[in-house]
Each structure stands twice: as structure tokens, then as C-alpha cells.
Amino acid sequence: MEKKDDINQRLKELSSRDFISSIVLIGACIFVILVSSRMRVYRSFSDSPAIFPVTIATIIGICSISLFIDSIKRGALQEIKKVWAQKNELIKTSALSRIIIIAGMIIIYGFFLVRHMHFTLATFIFLFGIMTYLKIFWITNLLISAGIALSISYVFGTIFNIPLP
Amino acid sequence: MEAFFEVLSSEFTLFTNIFSSVVSFNIFFMVVAGTFLGLVVGAIPGMTATMTLALLIGITYNFGFERAIALLIGIYVGAIYGGCIASIMINIPGTPSAAATVFDGFPLAKKGEGGLAIGVGTITSFYGMIIGIICLILFTPIVYQIALKIGAWEYFFLAIFGVAICGNLSSSEQPIKGWIAGFLGLFVSTIGLDPIYNYPRFTFGNSQLLGGIFIIPALIGVFGISEIVNVLKEKVPYSIPKKIGPIIPKLKTLKKYVTNGIRSGLVGVFIGAVPGVGEATASFIAYDMAKRASKEPETFGKGNYQGVVAAETANNACIGGALIPILTLGIPGSVGTALLMAAMIVHGVRPGPMLRTEFPGFTYHVFILMLIASVAMLVLGLLLARPLIALLKIRRDILMPIIVPLCVIGAYAANLRYFDMRVMIVIGILAYIFRWLEYPLPPLVLGLILGDMADVQFRRAMLISGGDPTRVFSRPISVALIIIIILMLFFSTGIGGRISRRISKAFSGSKK
């Protein structure tokens, strides 16, 4: 179980993220309320299409304001300055670059490869690419990528008769 | 009396009919195969029950309802149990529900008693399942009777209660983030044509959005893509203790765990029945109660079998409990059952108070499937413990990329739309950002699933009460729910939290 000091330290470190996310959420809530206010009212506002989103956006807005105030109390502004000063080191961390590259590969696969190529070929290219990045030995990588791409297509497309993209 | 026996006899006839239809080779095979698959995915860290369920809802779309639900129930039961293997052997919970098993499971494995800990975990998981099934049989008719009497306002507040309590418990240090996540889920469900006037909301001229955010791609994004990115972001090395020891415990040893098992099972059922809470919370609460009740609490966390018993019984008993609000009210008790509910909806079965009228015998159907899955879990768990431990050697950096194409098929298969694939990826990346910001994902999913119901019931209630929201105060169940929600929110925030801490401090002081 975490000790109280550890929890406080973690909450302090989180304050900068909470600060930014609360601002984004407050902005989003204002946007939702503005868009909802332009929605058509049929009989009365109480049963209009806008009432539920407006209610929800108001609740999220109130929670976000509370989170915003709380993050400032936990020292969000100092934490942001600290993070900003270390930004170059943070950008270079392997975890961040890994996340961006992996997410990028998934986007390329889902948005482009599958759309413009045969599913099996697209899957092979994706698996080979991502496992090369993850430093899997190339022969193992080639065999796994080809084997998995073919098996998935055969099992789902032919045996289970599921339409493939 | 005669009427009672008449009802009993008709229910028995219904049960036998359902039993004969369920116990066909096809369905039996599906449940056992699902349980096996669940054991495998549960045992592999990073592959969770929710991820697998989300993936397979789309893929089983062509299977037909009975076979699909049999497979999914098997997977759910198997995966919740399977998580204990990784928890015990490598100190990493295979699934979040097995997080409390780590405390005593891993110290036992380090002592060379990992096999026995898995054996005890398997048998007590079976215990938990049986307690859950018994409670499901006993309490479903009672809750169903209550469900028939409640109206639009109550359903709306039940949905809000589910989202709020789920938010509270899944982010105990910052419950406000849990509520934000839950209400965001409710908001996302409003995208598309509104269910009363068919007015397009937040579509911004995109015709693909008129049908709304389809639940399957959203679930696969939240539990599949975000989990893959999360697991692959860093390498977590782990080693498996070489000595495993015997698996099957002696009967004499098991007798010591009966009281703890029953208590933890009942805790699991109760927590499961509370909308939106789930297995992980159930196992932590049961673990804590077992520790408090123990004569040697100092041994907990150092390899006490009672810790494994409490956590494993509670998380499996939670499944039965979590199915009670689904089958009666249409409100999921946990994220796993929320996914089962999504699968039912996709196949045209709308859980809730009308379920017994529209699909008579469906509740029995679920009981029987759970019973088969429980027996399969016990047998496969004990027989396959050693091969399942060997599965922990699979490299996650090879396994995780393979799941991406399965996510793509799962998202595409239900509607055959490329748009759904894109929605899955976008939601998956947003869900990962949410994880990084430490917003819990279970309330988001619950909000997404309950959003439609909450929206319709809220507006229906407003229509019935002529636009006067104060009429809600004439309804006792609604008032009770409002008071519970307000108290829960109040005691989770700054001032309320300070008051509750002072009260508990005063109580603990007076005890001393």
C-alpha cells in the first residue's frame, strides 16, 4: 500500500497534467454548450435534443473547474515550469518516442495500408515494420509476420467466414 | 399455494427446456473453448478479460447469439480466474481483477509454493463462481420484481449512480477524474441522431456519425489499442521462479478456507451487484476483510494462503453479482459484464426488466452457461496449470503487435465500415492519453454504454413531469438515489473528505 507522502508526491507530479487537462475540458464544455444552444427545440427545452448534452457538459465543466483549482493548490504552475525547463530531455526519452512511433504505425496500418492493399499484405507489412522497430531478430520477424498475416486471413476470412477489411 | 406450485412447475419446465437446448455439443464446446481461451489470455500479462471480450464481440457477430454468448461467458469466467497465474508466478497481475492476489501469491511462489497457490486459487475461484451463481438464481427474481416497479427518473438516477460510484472507486485518490471520465462517456454516447426526435447532434455534417459512435469499435479502442500502446511503451523484464511445487491442495487444507471463502464470495457478489464497480474492487475489499478477520494479520503480504483465497473467491463471485443488475435493470455491475451487455445488444437482446417477457428463460440460459464455464475452469485450471505457467515466457513485444490486426477485424466486422476502424484507432489513442493523464477508463466505458438509456429516460421523465424536475422528489426510490449520489460525491471531495476522515479518526480513537 502506498504511503501518504508518496501519494502526495505523485499528486504533485500529476498537477501539471491535471491543470492542462482541466483547461482543455472546460474549453470543450463551453464549446458543447454553445453547439447545443443552436439545436432545435421541438415542444419545450425540457425534452429537446440539447438538454442531456447541456446537463452533462455542465457537470463535466463544474468537475473540471474543481480539478483546475485543486491542481493549482497542488502546485501545478511550479510543476509546469519545472517540466518546461526539462522539455528537451523529456522529448528525448525512449518511452515517449516509442509511444509516438507505435501509435503512428497503428494509424498508418488502420488508416492507409488496410484501405489501399489486400488485408494479408497490409498486415504483413505492419507486423514486419513494428517488430523491426521492436528489434526482433529479422528471420524470426519475417517468419512470424508472414505466418500470422496468412493465418489470421485464413482463420477469420475462410474458416469463420468473417468479412475482412 | 396452488398458484405458487403452478409458477414453480412452469419455471421448472422452462428450466428443463432451456437446459436441453443449452447442453448441445455446439454450445458446450463454445463454453469450454471460451473458458480455455479465457485462461490463456488471463494468464498472459497485458491481455485482459475486457480486451479479449471487446475484440471478440465484433468477431463473433456472425456466430449467432447463443454460440456467441456461450463463448463470451466462457472467456469472461476463464480470464478472471486466469489472471491469478501471472499474479502468483511473476508478480504482475494477468488481469486487473487479480491485482490483490499478487500480495500473497508472489511471496508464496518465491517460497517454491507457487503451484499450490495456483491450486488453491483455482479451487477458491470455483467456490466464488458457485456462490455467485447461487446468488444470481436467488436474487434475480427479487430484483426483477423491483425493476418492474421503477420508472424513468429511477433509471436515469441509477445510470448516474453507476457512473458516479464507478468513478469514485476506480480513482480513489482523485474521484473527480473518475466522474469526469464517466460523464465524458455519457457525452460521447449522445453523438449521432437523438433517439426521440432523430435530430443530428455533434455530427458536424459528417453522415458517418449519424448512427453515433458504435459501441464495439469504441470498446476495442479503449481496451485493445490503448492497452497495446501501454504494454509496448517499455520493456518490463520478469523472471519465473524455477520451483513450482505440487498443484492440487489437500482437502484438509481447503477446509481451513471455508469461512474466508464464503465471506469473500458474498463480498464479491455484493460489490458485483453495485453498478459499475467490478472485480478488482471486490478482491481488494475481500482481501482487506480477510486480513482484519485473521488472527495473524501480520502474515498477510508475506505469503498467507488466506489472502489468495479472499482475492480469488471475491473476483469470481463478482461475476454472478454483476450479472444481477444487467439481467434485471439493464445496468452493468462491472466493466466485463458491460461488455457482455454490449454483446447482447449487438445481437438484438436488450437486457432489463422486459428481458423475462421478451426472452423467457434467458436468465436460466446464463445460469447454465456459467455453471458449465465454472466446471470447465476448475478442470482446465488444475490440469493445465503447468503449461499455463510456461505461457508466461511468451514475449509481449511479439504478442502485442499481433493483436492489432485482430482489433481491426473486430472493429470492421460488425458494420463492414472503414469508418469504424478509424473510430477505434482514434478512441484508442485518446484512451491512451487518458491513461497517461491518469483518468480511469472503466467509468468512461460504463458511461458510453449507459448513455443512451440515461438520455432517453431523462427526457422521458422530464416529459412525464411536464418539464418540472421538482416532481422527482415525489418518488421515494429516486430521492434515495439522489441522497446516495450527493453523499458519495460530498464525502469524496475536499470538505466532505476531511469530515469523513475526522469521523473515522474519532471512531478509531474511541476504540482505543
Image: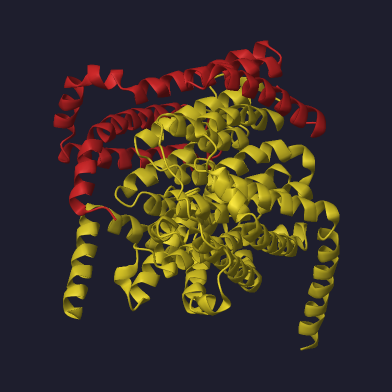
Chain colours: A red, B yellow
Q: Is residue B343 left or right of residue B317?
A: right
Measured as percent of width and height from the top left, residue B182 is found at 44, 44
Q: In the depicted view, which residue is nearer to us: B396 or B59?
A: B396
**Residue reaching furthest top?**
A116
Q: How many marks?
A: 0
Q: Position of residue B80 (x, y in %)?
A: 56, 54
Is B158 drawn above or below residue A9 in the view shown?
below
The C terminus of chain B, quarter of image:
bottom left
Residue at (79%, 56%) from the top-left corner?
Answer: B28
Quarter of the image that includes the N terminus of chain B: bottom right
Q: Nearer the viewer, residue B471 or B183?
A: B183
Q: Residue furthest bottom?
A: B1
Which residue is at a point 71% across and 63% down the rendered structure image? B363
Q: Is residue A54 above or below residue A35?
A: below
Figure quadrant of residue B370? bottom right
Which one is nearer the viewer's eye here, B421 or B329? Answer: B421
The picture places residue A13, in percent across and down from the top left corner, at 22, 36
Where, by quadrant of the figure, is residue B285 drawn? Answer: bottom left
Identify the residue shown where x is 48% and y is 67%: B309
Above or below: residue B271 compared with residue B405: below
Q: Nearer the viewer, residue A88 or B441?
A: A88
* Residue A147, visible in the rendered structure: yes
Position above or below: B232 against B119: above
Locate residue A100, reporting x and y percent. 42, 20
Is residue B337 something that shows in the picture?
no
Q: Residue furthest front?
A: B243
Could you tell whether B168 is left or right of B466 in the image? Answer: left
